[in-house]
Image (cartoon, rainbow, N blue to C red):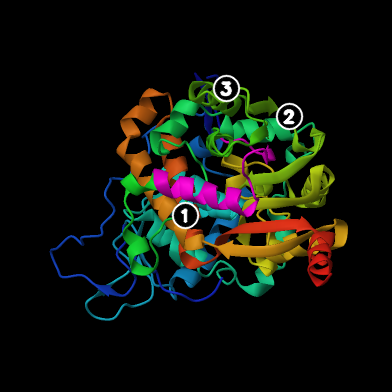
Amino acid sequence: MTMTEATGSAAGRGHEATTAARPGTVPAGAAVPPGTVPANAVPYTVPQAPAAVDAAIWPSIATVPSGLKAKVAGRAADAIFRAAVRRLPLEVRYPDGSVLGREPEPGHTYPVMTLNRPEAFAARLGDGGLIGLGESFMAGDWDADDLTAVMEVFAARVGTLVPEPLQKLRALYLPRQPRRERNTEQNTRSNISRHYDLSNELFATFLDSTMTYSSALFPESGDALQTVAWDGLAAAQQAKIDRLLDKAGVKEGTRVLEIGTGWGELALRAAARGATVYSVTLSSEQQELARKRVADAGYTDAVTIELKDYRAVEGEYDAVVSVEMIEAVGFEYWATYFQTIERVLAPGGKVAIQAITIAHDRLMATRTSYTWVHKYIFPGGVIPSVRAIEEITAKQTGLRVRERLAMGEHYAQTLRLWEERFMDRSDEVNALGFDAVFQRMWLFYLCYSRAGFETGYLDVQQIVLDHAATKGAAAKGAAA
């Protein structure tokens, strides 16, 4: 099994806020009695970065940016970082014993970020911005016992960390998305495989028995939601799927198109209702396992799973369902995505999608940015806003959004459970061929994502659509 930095994989098989109280963190501002360990402390130890990083696998991690440009950029990044940290509810510890961060009230504590190699951290930050923040964690330039809590501090203020005049220059300096990662029909298979074809065994280490890789929908709410346990995750994933199927009107005899198969749980539950399912994916690993699960359940005659781009789908379907796939479509192809759905949706049919969303102003500010997530996790991905979805469907299709359910707090807890499970099985991950740098990368990805949902920077929505004429026709029929 070989690993490559471009995928970070083994291949071959917005506003001022304090850290929210939640399991796995010491909330910013919370009193902690001296000499005690909080009951909600993170239940694992962050893996240490290796003393020597394999440059053949991780060239950007093994080598710190150098040269005159890197030196100047590093000094500027260090100055900006220090200025920002002084006003944040964060404790940044340096090797010389100095500490930066907003002064906490007596008896209170802030999340701790420990800089092991400040010069390397600054050099990476200057060279790549937020890409450098993630790479420097992967390299071990900095650490945090509670990584999510640290990332929440940054996520809550992501639009104001860099002074506004410098933000305007960002596009001139920071990298843009490579053309080779645009989600054309030629590129999309490669983009998808870099994440979803890592190995089914890797995903099985931290997903529940349903092998569902999207936000669950728990029965709990409020404070009770903050403490949901692993043994309730599978049922919460099935509840999420069942709600989507209900909203799409899936029942016996329904012809269902699923865009983005995952590992087959939605197709299985739709088939159990008596529906026939045509599901498309671009991941050969997912197709293989999903087909096996369908066969094992006895639904081979009812479920077809093909390796196909969504744009190539033909036929007519009573229901179209797609779970957290629109994020991989790409900003410039969202209209094509919805136009394809409109083209295959039968008269009177319904669409139910689940989508991670972002505020519209952040979408417009970052839609062409090339980030750490693009480089290491989801090449070509762009998270939509609700406004973008509504405007595109209204202006470029005959589909209309009829209802939405926001459930971002459920994603935060889904990610918490994945994070804890992944770290609990680090030995198994290592045995699969994924080294310590990969594990720190994956932990950063899970915590980075969770921080987005904890702070409200990200949300996830279940969105129901149908043909624009449907509502009018129904009203006309009722009046008659």
Q: Amino acid at mark 3?
A: Glu
Helix, strand or loop at label 1? It is loop
Q: Secondary structure at mark 2?
A: loop
The nearer-to-camera label among 1 and 3 is 1
Residue 136 in sight: no
- Would residue 151 appear left or right of 395 to someone viewing this image? left
Q: Amino acid at mark 2?
A: Lys
Q: Please tell me whether residue 392 is drawn above or below residue 82 in the rendered image.
A: above
Which comes before the other along the chain, label 2 or label 3? 3
- Real-space Cα separation, disc 2 to disc 3, in angstroms: 14 Å
Residue linked to disc 2? 308
401 versus 216 height, above or below: below
Crowd around label 3: few <14 · some 14–19 · many ≥20 (10 Å)? some
Name the kind of residue labelled 1 in the image.
Leu
Which residue is the site of mark 1?
217
Residue 225: percent from left, percent from top: 37, 62
Pick whichever, 421 or 111, lies toward us: 421
